[in-house]
């Protein structure tokens, strides 16, 4: 006996994690995706993911299957979660909603009634009001809600099951209460469940990430200042700052600049949205600049060491990270700077991460699998 049916549209890197966590909590889950071979691999349980726990959850699952049939997915449940890619566009200051909009248009073409649609991917503030609701215009008694995830690559399953915050941008109180109960069943801790309207939730999603990026950039700025101050210990300074309860220690240690598929683009997206509505988000602009400056400072410090050879271990956008994501990796930016200044640079990491780096950078580096 399951808790009920759930449809998840878009069973990619994040979608499959959501689906498996939903299934683990006792729901009967149908995933919908475009690619038959991928769907078959999931159904046959031969799919292999680098994301921790995914393969184990998939092998243990009893009430999760996938289909390429959107009509089947729509009819399967009144809860339709959408988890598709919204990549950066417009000079990284906006998100490309084209895949999401196509999914909403396809749902609308079937004219379903009495559905609750949840957008799990990151969108620009105003998307649901300005675009999303229009795309579902023929779906009677159907709500469109915003329910994005707060996860970290390499710990997605843990992030879904043990979040600090669950964000629900609900069109009305009924679906807000229903989703609150849904996530009480999903999570294994007792997270803060924030229910608000979709417009507030859209802005909250990117605002949270931007606060974190600002904190990281601030820590690195203080670290760089301390490095230029005779006798100052940047680690002791920031540790003391972090012990003030108004600040906290998380994301407050000096180190590499922030990177990856979320933090940089969310900071720029907030800046772009603010400009659109006529507001100058100076802190977001300064955060982006400080992050770039810190990478430059680190690169120049390494070059000043004047070594014949430099080695970098764990080259993904953060460490430790088992997933092959090198997008905006500060460590790789420094490595590239050194290599282009004539230095021999050796990159060391797991095979699947090295393969991605080799495709991106070719013969610029020497690669070692560890």
Image (cartoon, grey):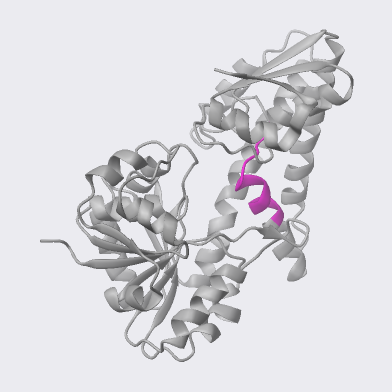
Q: Residue at x 59, y 23 (%)?
A: 314
Q: Is residue 261 magenta?
A: yes
Residue 301 left/right relative to 325: right
Q: Is residue 170 above or below residue 46?
A: below
Image quadrant assignment for residue 272:
bottom right
- Residue occupying image coordinates x 46% and y 54%: 12
Is residue 189 among what the camera can see?
A: no
Q: Quadrant of the N terminus?
A: bottom left
**Residue 356 on image: x %, y %:** 63, 35
Residues 238 and 367: in front is: 367
Q: Is residue 32 left or right of residue 187?
A: right
Position of residue 250 measured from the top left corner of the image (x, y, whole percent): 51, 32
> x, y percentage for residue 175?
33, 74
Give, as a single range, the part of the protein colored magenta. Answer: 257-268
The residue at the far left in this view is: 1
Residue at 63% across, 58% down: 87
Please state the horizontal and vertical placement of residue 47, each as a whole percent of the image: 38, 45
State yes or no: residue 36 in magenta: no
Taking depth in this image into account, of 259 and 241 the one nearest to the observer is 259
Would you identify the image quadrant in which residue 86 lies? bottom right
Residue 74 appears in the picture as rendered: yes
């Amino acid at each position: 006996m399951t808790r009920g049916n759930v449809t998840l549209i878009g069973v990619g890197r994040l979608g499959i994690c959501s689906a498996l966590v939903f299934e683990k909590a006792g729901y009967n889950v149908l995933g919908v995706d475009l690619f038959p071979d991928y769907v078959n691999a999931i159904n046959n349980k031969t799919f292999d993911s680098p994301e921790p726990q995914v393969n184990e959850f998939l092998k243990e699952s009893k009430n999760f299957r996938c289909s390429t049939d959107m009509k089947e997915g729509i009819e399967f449940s009144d809860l339709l979660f959408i988890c598709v890619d919204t990549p950066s566009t417009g000079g990284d200051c906006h998100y490309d909603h084209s895949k999401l909009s196509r999914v909403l248009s396809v749902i609308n073409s079937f004219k379903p009634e009495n559905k609750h649609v949840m957008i799990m991917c990151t969108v620009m503030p105003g998307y649901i009001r300005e675009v999303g609701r229009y795309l579902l215009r023929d779906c009677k008694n159907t709500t469109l809600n915003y329910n994005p995830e707060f996860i970290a690559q390499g710990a997605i399953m843990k992030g879904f099951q043990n979040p600090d915050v669950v964000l629900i941008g609900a069109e009305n109180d009924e679906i807000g209460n229903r989703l609150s109960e849904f996530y009480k069943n999903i999570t294994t801790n007792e997270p803060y469940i924030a229910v608000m309207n979709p417009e507030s939730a859209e802005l909250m999603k990117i605002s949270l990430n931007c606060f974190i990026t600002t904190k990281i950039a601030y820590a690195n700025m203080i670290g760089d200042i301390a490095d230029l101050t005779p006798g100052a210990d940047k680690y002791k300074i920031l540790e003391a700052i972090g012990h003030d309860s108004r600040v906290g220690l998380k994301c407050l240690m000096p180190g590499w600049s922030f990177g990856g598929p979320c933090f940089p683009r969310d900071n720029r997206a907030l800046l772009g949205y603010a400009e659109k509505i006529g507001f100058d988000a100076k802190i977001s602009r300064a955060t982006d600049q400080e992050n770039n400056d810190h990478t430059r400072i680190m690169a120049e410090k390494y070059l000043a060491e004047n070594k014949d050879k430099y080695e970098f271990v764990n080259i993904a956008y953060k460490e430790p990270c088992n997933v092959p994501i090198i997008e905006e990796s500060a460590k790789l930016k420094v490595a590239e700077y050194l290599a282009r200044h004539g230095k021999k640079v050796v990159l060391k990491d797991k095979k699947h991460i090295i393969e991605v780096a080799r495709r991106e950078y070719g013969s610029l580096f020497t690669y070692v699998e560890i």
